Amino acid sequence: MKKKHLAVVTLFSLVLLGCSSGDGTTVRHLEEQSGSQSYLFYGEAEAKALGSLKNVSIIDSSNPDNPLLKQIDTSAIRYAVPSSSMAYDTETKKYKELTVQHLSYASGTKAYTVDMKRGESDPQAVQNSSADKLSDFTYTKVNYLGETNFLVAHDDELNQTVLITPDMNSTRPPIVFGDRKLLSVTYSSYGEPVSGYLVYNSDSKQVETCLSNMEDCTEITDAGSRDYKGDVPGTTYSVLYSRGTIRRIDKSSGDVVEITLNGKEVKSGHGTTSFQGGSFYFIATDGTLNRVDIKNKKLIEIAKGDFIERIRSFTEEWVIFGSDVLLLAAKKDGSTTKPVKLIETDLTKGYKYVYYGMKDRYLYVTYALDPESGKTTFDACIFEDGETECKANSFWAGIALAKEGVYSPESSLPYTPYAFVRVDVNDTYGGGTLKAIDPNHPFDDGIAMGSVSNYNFQTFLSNSRFLASTIDSNGGIVLYAKDDTTFKVDAFYMNLLKENSLKKLTDNDVSKVTSGRDHCHGRHCMLCHSFAGGKIYQDINGSRSAYGYTLKFEFRNGETLKAKVAKGKGENFAIDARKLQGDFTALVVDENGDVVNQSAPYTHRGAKRANCNFCHARGGVTRHGAYGVITTHMTIE
């Protein structure tokens, strides 16, 4: 791989010291970031709501064992949500002072906020607005010069929906919001102060711009409740999409411009559309991946093929996409005549996609199963300049953001990275030694934080609202990880500047996280369900869940084995691949134990064909003589 990033001059010095370790590799330490510092927070993973926290505590990075404000009761809402801010130069695209500003939550019938800026006094929870009879709490995140979470709730005393911003206090009344949904904020030009809100009026079915007091609203265009796709960063534009037409809204003027897709129809399904930077990306029913330049109203075909099922991530130059079997990259300008293959899944190997597309590179993880031992191994990979380089026996666990850097809205992670967290010497679950890594030297050795077995640290960062929490405070960050032997999730503290600083902050009750969707927490399904795992559906198209059914394995020696039931609340199943030794017959059984479908006798080759989804794929793509997806009705007489 062309290591272009090794020569990049950043806005701050990352490397304080480089020294040789005992094995000849270079150990690189990070330099502490200057600028505003924030308190950190952590909580217990809520078993009933994926990515949620309860009993949240506020800590100072200098003494993580002694919470300054602890056991915040957040039982009334799904999330305790952070808001961040930054200063931004629209001409240079440089930002500074990226920091966590507030932590918002609800307790009982009141909204609260905590000032997270580190100061001389301990943080305090302050009632956020004078409203004290709230219900139906919903937070909406708006990305504008950071991430701000606005609370929309029902005020029982006013009998009205109201809006509460993080900077309100106990004396300010909430803003009466009416029957509206918050979409974004408005401003005269990008980088200028917020002047009001872009909203969807559920009663009139109109998109409106409203002044900050919500007393003066102007209808812009009619729309459906799900037509809004997002803002175009760095501009005053927002985007709606419906029935083959894009509508570009200028929030500063209220002007609406339609952009057609030249007759192309967007393919329905999860991951078939994505709005990133100044473009709208979509997979069309004709098997093409397309980009629409919102500013210039130009449509570009990027790639074509039956391997295009989902859009995964973005760098400034590349879009990462593919299917459950292929992970590919193509240039956004359509100049890639043949997409670059990052990895192709087979019966015993695959990839764990992450959203870590940065300005000039994309981080992802590959995995492989040894059918004989049942052990899983991982490689930490980087795609850059059209080439891939990997570090064996390693796993990307997270990214801490630089407080000062270049803002890249065309990439999935728009901020400059301050540090990578990498797990080396993995066990079969992705646990091992956590290290703080200089992003300019991603495959060199880093400073060791500590070791944890069986915990997978690729947890909340990909799939939840905690991106703002990865801004460090004097080197300290909080990450979450799942014990893959018990499914429980815990919070961990580490100081990226200090060796052996890893601390376990929570010890969640294992019994509360044992089944259903609670077990995954941001992991790619295939990492569990391809190793002696797959899916059972009610129909051959793979569109209806088959909850209550399971898979039974009958081996030549007379032994039987059943798959674990209800992973993913319905169609998913998985078992320990180490138990799949020898040829077997696969049978689908219902809740009564009756066989409703089965394979030909002893046609399945133990763990050597552990990835059921590889052969029994959706979309009509099957391999090794499989009869399509596994269903609850007979496909073989």
Image: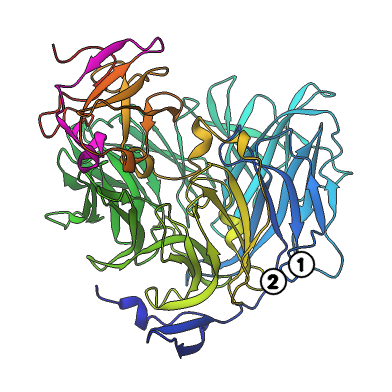
Residue drawn at (66%, 53%) of the image: 83
Residue 136 is left or right of residue 487, and the answer is: right
Of residue 413 and residue 243, the one placed in the foreground of this image is: 413
Residue drawn at (14%, 29%) of the image: 603
Q: Position of residue 16 (x, y in %)?
A: 53, 87
Q: Amino acid at mark 2?
A: Ser
Of residue 165 and residue 427, the one placed in the foreground of this image is: 427
Say which quarter of the image contains residue 150: top right
Whether residues under marks 2 and 1 lie with C-beta atoms below 8 angstroms apart, the answer is yes
Residue 314 falls within the magenta-colored stretch: no
Looking at the rendered image, the quarter that the C terminus falls into is top left
| Span shown in magenta | 590-615
Residue 193 visible in the picture: no
Q: Which mark is residue 36?
A: 2
Residue 613 falls within the magenta-colored stretch: yes
Say which quarter of the image contains residue 180: top right
Q: Position of residue 413 (x, y in %)?
A: 45, 58
Q: Which mark is residue 118?
A: 1
Q: Position of residue 260 (x, y in %)?
A: 28, 36
Say which quarter of the image contains residue 162: top right
